[in-house]
Image: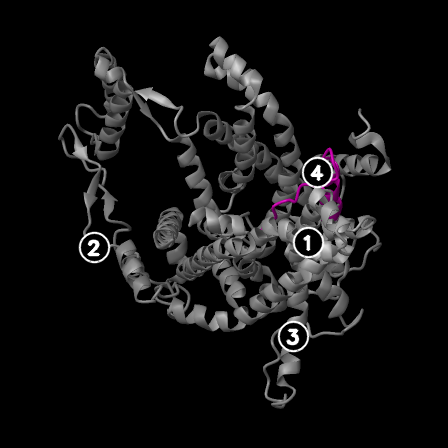
Amino acid sequence: MSRNGIFSNWSGWLSFGWLLLLLIGALLADAVTLPSGPDLLRASAAPLTPGHLLGTDSQGQDVLSGILHGARTTLLISLPTAISAATLGTALGVVAGYWGNTRLRLPRAWVLAGGGALLLYTLLCAPERSPVAGWWPLVLASGGIVSGKILARRGWGRTAVVLPADTVVSASMVFLAAVPRLLLVLVVAATIEPSISSLILLLTLTFWVPTARLVRAEVQRIRQLPYFEAATALGVPAPQIILRHVLPGCWPLVRTSLPLSLAVLISLETTLSFLGVGLPPEMPSWGRVLAAGRVSPTCWWLIIFPTMALLFTALSLRRLLPDLGQSRVTSKAK
Amino acid sequence: MVRRIFYQAGQALLIIWATITLLFLLTRSLANEQIILARFIGDESTASSSLGQRQQAQQQARHRLGLDLPLFYLARTAADSSEAWLAPRWYWTGTQNQYHQWVRGLGRGDAGLSYRNQEAVSSLLANALQHTLPLALLAGVLLITLSVPLGIWLAAPGRNVALVVLFALDTLPLFVVALLLLLLLANPDMAALFPAYGLGADETTSFWSAPASYISYLILPLASLVLTGIAEPAIQLATALRIELQKEYVLAARAKGLSAAQTLRRHALRNAWLPTITLLTDLLPNLLAGSLVVELIFALPGLGRLLAEAAAAHDHPVLLGGAVLIVLVRQLSLWLAEGLYRLADPRLRTHSL
């Protein structure tokens, strides 16, 4: 590890240890014998009560078990979301940055044939009892391919149509930025059925923007560099250039933004569960422990312990960055 | 110049229209109608009523909530059993659809009726804004006036402890900071300095002490909004200032005899605060969204609490109305940002003229 690496001093070791502890706690949440159901005899018990190390809430639920199971919920949501959002953001950022508004060209024949097939598919459907039922998508796909091939024989069909990739990606960024993120997630999460997979999908679709913005700018910078020009001049095909020359240059950026977006996602998930939106009501979460703390404000242990868990996790994730992050200000879930 | 203003206004209108249309269609089409009906069907259906009565009650509830109309101008054709080879997938519904009615209502300033209590959404929002706007505006003013000196202070060397504290505040969610403040400063066990809940609008307060008690109820919500909001602009400003202070024009300014403070204020700050302006103009929409949790925790009857309760209760018209309001505020503040940029950076002014 280099001098700037995470293991260079004690705070790096500490944050690594905390994240490892969190992971183990989340994995072994069921194996540890903890009181799972409500313990009605010891409701609102203070910490260090026998059997309840960190106390219980007003319903008699154990706080330690809530924090361990909540860690599992948090990781189960934030890890896949962060990874898929980073992937989606990188893909869209590369598309927007590499092809820009002028370089994504398709032969006119294929644009016409594909667009026609899609249009027919959206406008018309085959009723269940008609002879073409079930075959309709296949008929359209093969028809599109055949007509594309026929049209491509003419010189007129081979002239290129420019697709404005950059404009499309930038416009969708603007639309996603038009609503504050917390409100957007809240509005949509309140309408869908609460479940883990739908929440992951929703968060992914709203969280790709920062990564895409970074990657797009980086690809535009890389495109000006001599080695990129050399690869283009050599006639290396576009997928090869992207895979071998563009993506390795973007990787440090994505790696830096991943822990930050994890921290933001964890705090957003906690906020959503605190508001009682997005996850099924029986899912344990840090936000729910904190929500129990709001109802009974004299039970300080309901607020202090989940807050410490949140704070340690966020600070450890920040410590994973190459630099302490003084030069990069995070975008925060609001 | 005029053309540019019109162009930007058109762009903003397009974004507003597209965003609220998407939100409307998303929330209406993703929502499970049965759940909504089961929640808001009222007293008409009891367990003892027959199937026919229950269906009739459902029909009435759908009519009352406006769910019996088609959603959009185009509606999906039912999967019928016709023997035609191909059938159109969509049919035209005319103007009798939910979207058309909703948008026409919005034009008249009427955002529909709440599912829960059949009150007009616009009056609900107006009532809520009365309590939220003072809070958000006060917090905004405090943030702007405090973040610039804080950023300048942080830019000096040797402020690492303060930076770590600010980072910690920045990473904690807003509601956790609010809960911590509640625990520390409004708790009979610790220090009951401030009232914990509500606005204290009882008759016992006299006319003269009313403003003071109002302020004392607002202090904790304000503090939580300011504490979580201040880290980002202050750190950004400090970072930019540190970079600017190493440039040569600063050295030149010092060499011609300006004091360090003058150099900072007249030269470095004017270059460093451009990115901060962007953050500060996002402030009002973000504060309105941040009031979601703060008002819920401190039990203030404002916009945020209205929206949070509407979200928990599946009350879509209220949620949508609030979203439209915040989208409007966002676009307005983007416009403001453009103007501020022109004021702060003369290069932009000459460029566009």
> Tag 2: residue type?
Thr
Name the residue furthest left.
Answer: B84
One can see residue A26 in this view: yes
Give the Cα distance between marks 4 and 2: 53 Å
> Tag 3: residue type?
Tyr
Q: Secondary structure at mark 2?
A: loop
What span is colored magenta in the figure?
A309-334
Residue where numbered disc 3 is placed: B217
Q: Is residue A79 left or right of residue B331?
A: right
The percent position of residue A172, horizontal first and vertical second, equals 43, 40
Give the Cα distance between marks 3 and 4: 40 Å
Q: Are marks 3 and 4 in contact (CB under 8 Å)?
A: no
Q: Earlier in the sequence, mark 1 or mark 3?
A: 3
Give the Cα distance between marks 1 and 4: 36 Å
One can see residue A306 in this view: no
Residue where numbered disc 2 is placed: B95
The percent position of residue B138, horizontal first and vertical second, equals 60, 69
Q: Give the chain letter at badge 2.
A: B
The percent position of residue A212, horizontal first and vertical second, equals 52, 34
Q: Nearer the viewer, mark 2 or mark 1?
A: 1
Q: Earlier in the sequence, mark 2 or mark 3?
A: 2
Residue where numbered disc 4 is placed: A26
**Towards the viewer: B132 or B243:** B243
Q: Is residue B146 above or below residue A191?
A: below
Q: Give the chain letter at badge 1.
A: B
On residue B234, the disc is: 1
